[in-house]
Image (cartoon, rainbow, N blue to C red):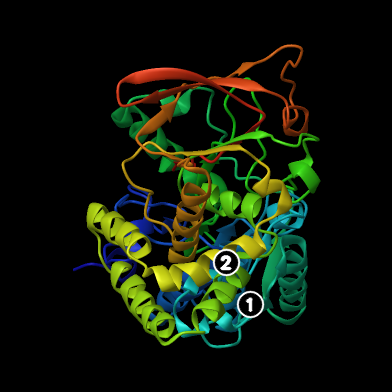
């Protein structure tokens, strides 16, 4: 007969996060099933951690005499600690930096909205978020540092009110930094190294066995945002995209966005529009309300997007999303196109060369708001210029070549706006392209 902990660790969805051969250790950034689409937004992490801890408490795995040890003071880690404390479970949070929500606090150009990626569900217009039971973390829309301050303030209050121990500047000894080239190893060998990292986790981190549960909330992997020797801005950074001329001082910069996922799509929208994505879709929907046919199309689009989010055949999703945009009645598209044109940044209008590169035949499954707006933008540019910004089934060589007199240094700001040559491989042919701005969003190398 399985113990409560063994039963918990073997039952989906909790089994998705269970670390093999390491009893009581769960990694909330681990994606055991790559085909399973689970969001990684701040709200997604807050809700996952809250749900996870509540379930563990309800099964008596943790309790007043069975505390929890948490690594990482980001969205998931802080949410887990505050939820545990609210339920009477002592929680210890260890964080390698000196404060919680460090990446968001340093990202001055990212706009965050709690329900941005809920669209087209009804709550997408609500700028505020509350926890599952309105007692955990709550926050409202703002730039990332503002959101980090809101969440950090609540965490500070919780530490004074509940049994929460926060230990900053405390790294996990048994979670060493990966050695260079780790990601290039064959999958079986990489998996074995991954398992070895955790075999002694409990013995090293909790030799006296003071904790009943160990939650690793240190993220989803190592971000790939550069094309060596080129240095790129990480997703959570203050980048020059919102600046005039995109911060490169050129009137017609050549721009490459490589990746295709949510990060790359979000950055493409930031290059194009001067307002957040929810404002873009809101203005588009308002524009379509002027005609009866527009209102009918809006209802159809909302229903179809919701349906597509339930489909796990990625090729079918791609075909249907494309068809949803390309089949818009001309009368309705006129108003959408007009709304898009009004919102485009002047820098984007005069930017004659922008390419959106991704390796598959379709844009990877993403949050529907990003995807629908990117497809709107693609159609608009194609009709205006005759150029398709999409380069599907295209991969980049692992390295770029800085064009003299530029030579890459260690800072992303020193590479931004300076030309780099990249090799694009598409459908069996290879071609060199020069770009002034490289934005690399090749995802998070999985744990």
Residue visible at 74% across and 51% down in the picture: 242
Q: Mark 2 points at which residue?
A: 338
| Residue 421 x/y as whole percent | 58, 19
Q: Which of marks 2 and 1 is in front?
A: 2
Q: Name the residue under label 1.
A: 137
Q: Can residue 207 be seen in this view?
A: no
Q: Residues within 10 Å of mark 1 (few under 14, many from 20)?
A: many
Please determine whether, in this image, residue 271 is positioned above or below residue 331: above
Residue visible at 33% across and 65% down in the picture: 324
Q: The residue tagged with tag 1: helix, strand or loop?
A: loop
Q: Is residue 280 left or right of residue 32?
A: right
Judging depth in this view, the residue of 306 and 112 nearest the camera is 306
| Residue 276 x/y as whole percent | 65, 65
Q: The residue tagged with tag 2: helix, strand or loop?
A: helix
Q: How far apart are marks 2 and 1 (CA)?
A: 39 Å
| Residue 151 x/y as whole percent | 71, 71
Which of the image's four quarters has the C terminus? top left
């Amino acid at each position: 007969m399985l113990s409560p902990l063994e039963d918990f660790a073997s039952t989906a969805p909790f089994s998705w996060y269970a670390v093999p051969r390491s009893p009581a250790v769960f990694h909330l950034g681990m994606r055991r099933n790559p085909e399973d689409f689970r969001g990684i937004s701040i709200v997604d992490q807050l809700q996952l951690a809250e749900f996870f801890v509540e379930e563990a408490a309800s099964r008596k795995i943790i309790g007043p005499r069975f505390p929890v040890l948490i690594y990482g003071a980001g969205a998931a880690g802080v949410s887990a600690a505050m939820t545990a404390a609210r339920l009477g479970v002592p929680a210890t949070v260890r964080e390698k930096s000196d404060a919680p929500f460090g990446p968001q606090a340093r990202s001055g150009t990212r706009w965050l909205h709690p329900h941005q990626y809920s669209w087209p569900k009804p709550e997408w217009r609500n700028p505020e978020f509350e926890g599952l039971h309105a007692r955990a973390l709550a926050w409202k829309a703002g730039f990332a540092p503002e959101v980090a301050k809101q969440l950090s303030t609540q965490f500070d209050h919780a530490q004074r009110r509940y049994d929460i121990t926060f230990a900053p500047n405390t790294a996990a000894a048994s979670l060493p930094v990966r050695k260079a080239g780790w990601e290039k190893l064959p999958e079986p060998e990489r998996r074995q190294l991954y398992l070895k990292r955790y075999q002694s986790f409990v013995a090293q981190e909790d030799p006296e066995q003071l904790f009943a549960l160990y939650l690793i909330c240190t993220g989803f992997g190592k971000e790939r945002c550069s094309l060596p020797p080129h240095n790129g801005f990480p997703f959570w950074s203050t980048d020059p995209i919102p600046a005039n001329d995109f911060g490169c001082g050129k009137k017609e910069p050549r721009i490459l966005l490589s990746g295709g996922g949510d990060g790359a799509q979000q950055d493409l929208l930031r290059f194009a529009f001067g307002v957040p994505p929810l404002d873009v879709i809101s203005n588009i929907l308002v524009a379509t309300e002027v005609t009866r046919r527009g209102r009918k199309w809006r209802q159809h689009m909302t229903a179809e997007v919701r349906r597509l989010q339930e489909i796990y055949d990625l090729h079918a999703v791609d075909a249907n999303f494309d068809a949803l945009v390309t089949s818009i009645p001309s009368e309705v598209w006129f108003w959408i196109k007009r709304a898009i044109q009004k919102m485009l940044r002047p820098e984007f209008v005069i930017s004659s060369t922008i390419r959106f590169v991704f390796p598959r035949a379709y844009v990877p499954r993403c949050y529907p708001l990003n995807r629908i707006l990117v497809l709107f933008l693609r159609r608009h540019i194609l009709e205006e210029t005759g150029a398709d910004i999409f380069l599907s089934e295209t991969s980049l060589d692992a390295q770029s070549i800085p064009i003299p007199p530029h030579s890459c240094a260690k800072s992303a700001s020193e590479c931004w706006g300076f030309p780099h040559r990249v090799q694009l491989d598409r459908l069996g042919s290879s071609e060199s392209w020069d770009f002034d701005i490289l934005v690399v969003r090749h995802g998070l190398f999985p744990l």
